[in-house]
């Protein structure tokens, strides 16, 4: 398992990346609203692909979203290869016509970032807004950015990733 | 290779079926037993089209007909529509309790006839559930009996040892014929009662033991020692990230 996570975090993709900087997040949840609006045409944050957690007492907010892992658990468990990496955006995308709705990916995702939308009857996960993520556009504090993988960005991403890794070292 | 579908020129690769090439070109052909994860089965017969191959006309199921030469396809001639109407009528009589077939029965304007309804039945024997189960690596169900008694079931209708309780069969069923009961921490499907595992954090039941074993067998269950549902997993991720911020 450790090797697997190593691979997830050491990836240096050629695609633009959704970079999360939780220290900048104000917890306004605008990203959740726009995400659900773009994907399901409703302001329903329970069906949003990105989730913001507010910890009022400790005074911080963290957006959690799919990491588009290079070795993705969701893709590995899918029996029909309905989850594949998009060549254009580098995102893991679900082919809803091919998907069997066995929901194994929702259980397998280590971050809980793959959800089942019971109303649309689809597996919902971040698809990087098909190369144009609206959450980034509406984020008022710059906690979400969508950038080319330059050296500086890679180190930002790695900083975020290092926290993820610490999470799982603690859990595992 | 180019073929003509409803006067529209469509580029197809050798061996591709008429159905997939038509769908790619945005031409609608109705289907019930077709699912993209599998090859065409030609069971429901709704996807019938008329193929003109070097002047010889024939009616084929578009989901199983591979294009190997230049042909002309018509998806909706009066003859085809009449056949579809009859097929919908017969499918409806087989599975009258199904909403989708009832709607189609009305949509196609099927006329009254002497065939009797099957008022309790929802299954139209399309075999998709069997294929889905097979794809999950379980094959807990298959089509049993012959003729009018044909139906999908586990061996002897008993609880199957290999059933994962994932519910892919129920989710794929075009007529919602497969019942999944989930209550009081149990899931009952195909006469098998699963005790659902509870999330260690919120206590909500979220998966069957068999499902986790399936994910484990792919080597991908994140933390085998703890049972955490996806909502708590997400929250935990956030919490821990917060601590390290």
Image (spheres, grey):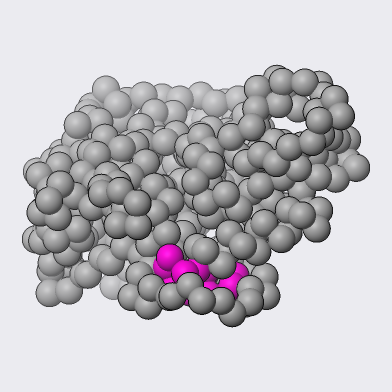
Residue A168 point in image, percent of width and height = 23, 40
On the image, the x and y values in percent for residue B112 come to 59, 79
Q: Say whether residue A4 is left or right of residue B225.
A: right
Question: Which residue is at a point 63% across and 77% down the rendered structure image?
Answer: B111
Work out whether residue B57 or residue A35 is closer to the camera in this orientation and state it. Answer: B57
Q: Nearer the viewer, residue A77 or A134?
A: A77
Image quarter for residue A162?
A: top left
- Residue at position x 43%, y 75% from top? B117
Vertical arrangement, residue A53 with respect to residue B237, above or below: below
At horizontal 37% and vertical 41% (from top left) the residue drawn is B131
Above or below for B117 versus A104 = below
Q: Which image quadrant for residue B20?
A: top right
Image location (x, y in percent) of residue B133: 30, 43
**What stretch of residues is rendered in magenta?**
B92-105
**Position of B121 relative to B213 (above/below):** below
Residues A6 and A105: in front is A105
Q: Decide if residue A139 is in sight here.
A: no
Quadrant containing the C terminus of chain A in the rendered view: top left
* Quadrant occupied by the N terminus of chain A: top left
Q: Describe residue B141's horizontal placement relative to residue A34 as left or right.
A: left
Q: Give the total number of marks visible in the rendering.
A: 0
The percent position of residue A104, horizontal first and vertical second, equals: 31, 46
Foreground residue among B158 and A164? B158
- Relative to residue A83, is residue B238 depicted above or below? below
Q: Main secondary structure of the magenta part?
A: helix
With B33 as the anchor, is B236 left or right in this view? Answer: left
Q: Residue at x 73, y 59 (%)?
A: B81
């Amino acid at each position: 398992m450790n090797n697997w996570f190593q691979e997830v975090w050491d990836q240096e993709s050629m695609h633009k990346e959704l970079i999360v900087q939780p220290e900048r997040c104000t917890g306004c949840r605008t990203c959740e609203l726009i995400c659900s609006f773009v994907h399901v045409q409703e302001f329903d944050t329970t069906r949003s692909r990105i989730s913001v957690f507010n910890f009022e007492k400790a005074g911080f907010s963290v957006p959690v979203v799919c990491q588009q892992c290079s070795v993705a658990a969701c893709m590995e468990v899918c029996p029909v290869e309905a989850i594949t990496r998009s060549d254009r955006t580098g995102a893991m995308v679900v082919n809803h016509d091919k998907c069997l709705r066995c929901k194994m990916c929702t259980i397998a995702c280590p971050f809980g970032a793959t959800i089942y939308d019971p109303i649309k009857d689809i597996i919902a996960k971040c698809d990087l807004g098909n190369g144009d993520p609206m959450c980034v556009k509406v984020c008022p504090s710059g906690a979400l950015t969508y950038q080319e993988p330059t050296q500086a960005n890679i180190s930002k991403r790695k900083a975020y990733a290092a926290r993820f890794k610490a999470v799982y070292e603690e859990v595992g | 290779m180019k073929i003509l579908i409803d006067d529209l020129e469509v580029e197809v690769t050798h061996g591709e079926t008429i159905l997939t090439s038509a769908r790619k070109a945005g031409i609608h052909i109705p289907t019930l037993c077709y699912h993209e994860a599998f090859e065409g089965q030609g069971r429901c017969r709704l996807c019938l089209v008329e193929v003109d191959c070097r002047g010889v006309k024939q009616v084929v199921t578009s989901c199983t007909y591979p294009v190997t030469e230049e042909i002309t396809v018509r998806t909706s001639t009066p003859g085809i529509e009449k056949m579809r109407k009859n097929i919908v009528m017969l499918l409806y009589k087989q599975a009258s309790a199904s909403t989708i077939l009832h709607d189609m029965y009305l949509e196609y304007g099927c006329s009254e006839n002497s065939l009797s309804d099957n008022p309790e039945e929802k299954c139209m024997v399309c075999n998709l559930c069997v294929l889905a189960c097979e794809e999950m690596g379980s094959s807990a169900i298959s089509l049993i009996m012959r003729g009018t008694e044909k139906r999908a079931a586990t061996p002897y209708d008993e609880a199957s040892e290999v059933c994962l309780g994932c519910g892919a069969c129920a989710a794929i069923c075009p007529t919602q014929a497969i019942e999944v009961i989930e209550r009081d921490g149990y899931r009952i499907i195909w006469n098998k009662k699963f005790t659902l595992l509870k999330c260690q954090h919120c206590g909500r039941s979220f998966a069957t033991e068999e499902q986790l074993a399936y994910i484990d067998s792919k080597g991908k269950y994140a933390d085998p020692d703890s049972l955490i549902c996806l909502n708590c997993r997400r929250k935990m991720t956030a919490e821990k990230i917060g601590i390290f911020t």
